[in-house]
Image (cartoon, grey):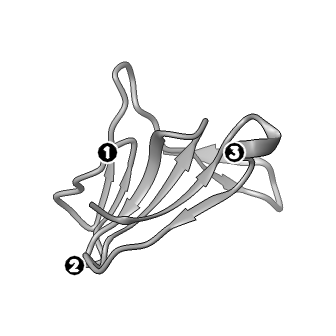
Amino acid sequence: MASVISAGTTSGTSLNLTGDTSGQLQFQTNGTTTAVTIDTSQNVGIGTSSPANSLQISKATYPTVQLTETKIGRAHV
């Protein structure tokens, strides 16, 4: 389990907070979809609830990372 900050799509679920003592924090979208997890080792997972590395990005098809140099507007991968 984890402490969860959840954003829903209706007035009744617009923002929910639940807590536990696991030390893990999750951000959820659409009420129950885990978007970001920070575990007790400070590993961050995007698209996964159990990150195995400092930063883990999971997506079913073609996960990408884009870093943009804002001064010039160029993207670097």
Figure quadrant of residue 69:
bottom right
Q: Is residue 54 above or below residue 9?
A: below
Q: Amino acid at mark 3?
A: Thr
Q: Which residue is mark 3?
A: 13
Q: Secondary structure at mark 2?
A: loop
Q: Amino acid at mark 1?
A: Thr
Q: What is the x, y in percent for residue 27?
A: 51, 57
Depth-wise, is mark 3 or mark 2 nearer the camera?
A: 3
Specify whether 62 is left or right of 32: left
The residue positioned farthest toward the top in the image shown: 61
Q: Amino acid at mark 2?
A: Ser
Q: Which residue is mark 2?
A: 41
Specify whether 23 is left or right of 8: left
Out of 73 and 53, give the one closest to the viewer: 53
Q: Quadrant of the N terminus?
A: bottom left
Q: CA distance from mark 3 to mark 2?
A: 30 Å
Disc on res. 48: 1
